[in-house]
Image: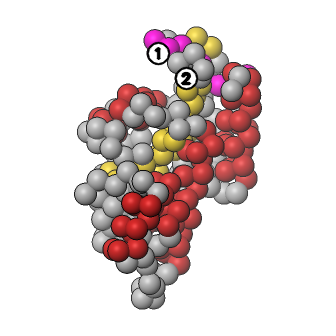
């Protein structure tokens, strides 16, 4: 994909998420690998509803800022995914309401944050790691992601929001939307004795679709 098309795609998909209430105000950030090994990143303090393709922060392959506005302060978080997951072509972070609510539940499983409710969440996200609370911009968040050694494509920052890596911008956005939808389903059905997938059904999905699922 050309640099121009990638810039457009980042802004169009970010706006789509903003328009559907997936991250409000100036929250959320997004980054993508460029064809020459650099990175395009949403600038600090910008709204997903109004990203300007021409002003995205642009890094060269050595990590030097070569154009655009200063990047999001969550840059260490994005960098940690690219460093540990060779397949990562894009990283998205949202402040999405239902997943944040679910991260506050006392019975949330830190190793497998989303209950197994639908096959697509398993296929697109694998196991989502619930990380503890960090101050916004704390480089320790990046360290926590590095500690996962590239084994997870999706993490949930407690009381803050999800971060998902994908092979490209579209895949990362689709996966983080699946995460938020599943968190919403979990809250909608909470305490109602809903039937999730059985262990055998989860195993079937994992093997049939070759899901990364360390256990
Ligand atoms: Zn954030």
Tag of residue 11: none
Task: Name the quarter where the C terminus is drawn.
Answer: bottom left
Tell me the number on the disc at residue 39.
2
Residue under the point 68% across and 27% down: 1
In this orientation, which residue lies closer to the viewer: 65 or 127? 127
Q: In this view of the protein, can residue 130 be seen by the observer?
A: no
Q: Vertical placement of 104 versus 141: above or below?
A: below
**In magenta stretch: residue 208:** no
Q: Residue at x 34, y 55 (%)?
A: 213
Answer whether residue 57 is magenta in the image: yes
Q: Who's the residue at 33% across and 74% down the image? A: 199
Beta carbon of the mark 2 residue lies under 8 A of ligand 1: no
Establish if 39 lies above or below 16: above
Real-space Cα separation, disc 1 to disc 2, in angstroms:
8 Å
Relative vertical location of residue 188 with respect to residue 181 in this rendering, above or below: below
| Residue 115 rendering spot, x and y as whole percentages | 40, 70
- Residue behind mark 1: 63
- Establish whether ligand 1 lies closer than 8 Å to the Cβ of label 1: no
């Amino acid at each position: 994909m050309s640099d121009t098309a990638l810039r457009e795609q980042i802004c169009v998909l970010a706006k789509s998420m903003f328009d559907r209430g997936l991250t409000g105000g100036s929250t959320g950030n997004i980054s993508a690998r460029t064809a020459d090994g650099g990175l395009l990143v949403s600038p600090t303090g910008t709204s997903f509803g109004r990203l300007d393709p021409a002003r995205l922060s642009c890094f060269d392959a050595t990590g030097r800022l070569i154009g655009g506005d200063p990047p999001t302060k969550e840059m260490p978080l994005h960098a940690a995914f690219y460093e540990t997951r060779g397949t990562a072509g894009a990283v998205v972070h949202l402040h999405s309401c239902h997943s944040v609510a679910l991260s506050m539940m006392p019975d949330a499983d830190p190793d497998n944050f989303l209950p197994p409710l639908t096959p697509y969440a398993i296929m697109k996200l694998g196991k989502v790691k619930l990380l503890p609370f960090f101050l916004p911009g704390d480089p320790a968040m990046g360290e926590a992601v590095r500690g996962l050694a590239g084994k997870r494509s999706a993490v949930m920052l407690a009381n803050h929001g999800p971060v998902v890596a994908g092979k490209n911008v579209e895949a990362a956005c689709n996966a983080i939307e699946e995460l938020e939808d599943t968190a919403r389903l979990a809250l909608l059905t909470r305490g109602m004795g809903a039937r999730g997938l059985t262990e055998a059904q989860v195993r079937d999905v994992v093997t049939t679709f070759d899901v990364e699922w360390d256990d």
